Image (cartoon, rainbow, N blue to C red):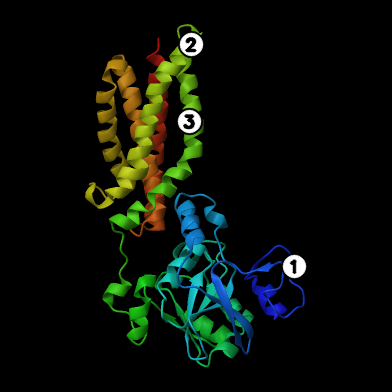
Amino acid sequence: MKEQIDKADLCCSTQTPGLAPDYRKPGFKLCSYVDDFVKTKAGLVPVIKSKPGKDDLFSSFYVRCGIKRYQYAVAPGLYGIGKPDKNSEVLVTANFKLTFDHLRKELKDINAWILVLDTKGINVWCAASEGNFSTRELVKRIKASSLEKVVDHKRVIVPQLGATGVSARAVKKGAGFRVVYGPIRASDIPAFLQNNKKADKKMRQVTFNLYERLILTPVEIQIVLKPAAIIALILFILSGIGPGIFSFSGAWERGVLSFSALAAGIFSGAFVTPLLLPFIPSREFALKGIIAGSIFAILLLLLISSAVNGIAEVLALFLFSVAISSYLAMNFTGTTPFTSPSGVEKEMKRFIPLQLGALVISSGLWVYSAF
């Protein structure tokens, strides 16, 4: 028992577990999502809860905001849910806990095994493209968990979005298990299992609706906060440059204006553009950001028109805000199912020089407008 628990590191403990066979001994605490253990021919396997607790919900909220996102992982290995037995299906997933939680909450009243791969705390789709959700890792986990001793059948169900990283033929050759590619969404798994493990057209289609776009925006905004703080400091310094070499009052008065342009660019590029993605013209995300950024920059300039002096300041604020919006909108390409690596590369090569040029020109105009 000690070997089985230690090997997968499936429980939380303040000390190294001893040889005592009872996992409930003092100092040994179960992770909140582990309910019990089930005995198999391969040893004890933790049985997890299908309903996430309050701590899971709070943690998910933090991760959605980008807080400790890359530390939000569960231990790789074999888990059970419900009352699994030797005939239960084996569902493969990533060790990103948000993915893990999505899967288990859809398995209410289902008896199954969950084989968690070590994807370095990354979701299935991204991990597959980066080589972490892979044939090699799947074969390794099948062997490490002695899966052939746990189930009588020889098949594992792999999520469709992990198919780019997993070769069914290689898994069969390396571990003796047949790969069945499941649906895209965890919510379709119950219907998939009831349909004799066959996915219909809807289960194979990738969606990116309003809600799916909305829940990604907090991460996009959080990512830019630290760079934005540095940029804001630079803006206040530039805003203080003038006829008297440097003016603290000018730095504050003009700095507030430039900061408002920065905020408008972040809002339009990291929030509005993703939210209205299908409705903004153009296939290129950077151009979508330019369109949205231009609208919000004009609205901002109308709002602060009484505080802006001269055409140079107007152009400086406009170009700066639009460049920020365009860059952040383009940065969203890695989060969507609408782009390809080659398309993203081409777009970056085309628009990054334009964005940098707009920033340089706007900086020059901003300093010039103070004289």
The 10 Å Cα crowd at callout 1, few under 14, some 14 to 19, many 20 or more, is: few
**Upstream in sequence: badge 3 or badge 2:** 3
**Disc on the earlier residue, 2 or 1:** 1
Q: Please count the marks in the image.
A: 3
Q: Point out the frontmost of discs 3 and 1.
A: 1
Kind of residue sitting beneath label 1: Thr
Looking at this view, name the residue that lies furthest to the top.
244
* SS category of the residue bearing label 3: helix
Q: In this view, does 43 lie to the left or right of 108?
A: right
Specify the quadrant of the image occupied by residue 306. Answer: top left
Q: Quadrant of residue 316?
A: top left
Question: Nearer the viewer's eye, disc 2 or disc 1?
Answer: 1
Reading the image, the residue beneath label 1 is: 16
Q: Distance between the residues labelled 2 and 1?
A: 61 Å
Quadrant where the image shows the C terminus = top left
Identify which residue, 104 or 228, lies in the foreground.
Answer: 104
Q: Quadrant of residue 265?
A: top left
- Name which residue type carries label 2: Ser
In this view, the residue farthest toward the right is 19
> Where in the figure is residue 122, as x and y percent of width and height?
51, 61
SS at mark 2 in the image = loop
> What is the C-alpha distance between the residues marked 3 and 1?
46 Å
Residue at left offset 55%, top offset 74%: 35
Name the mark on residue 231: 3
For mark 2, what is the residue? 247
Q: Residue lying at the far bottom in this picture: please name it.
A: 152
Amino acid type at image mark 3: Ile
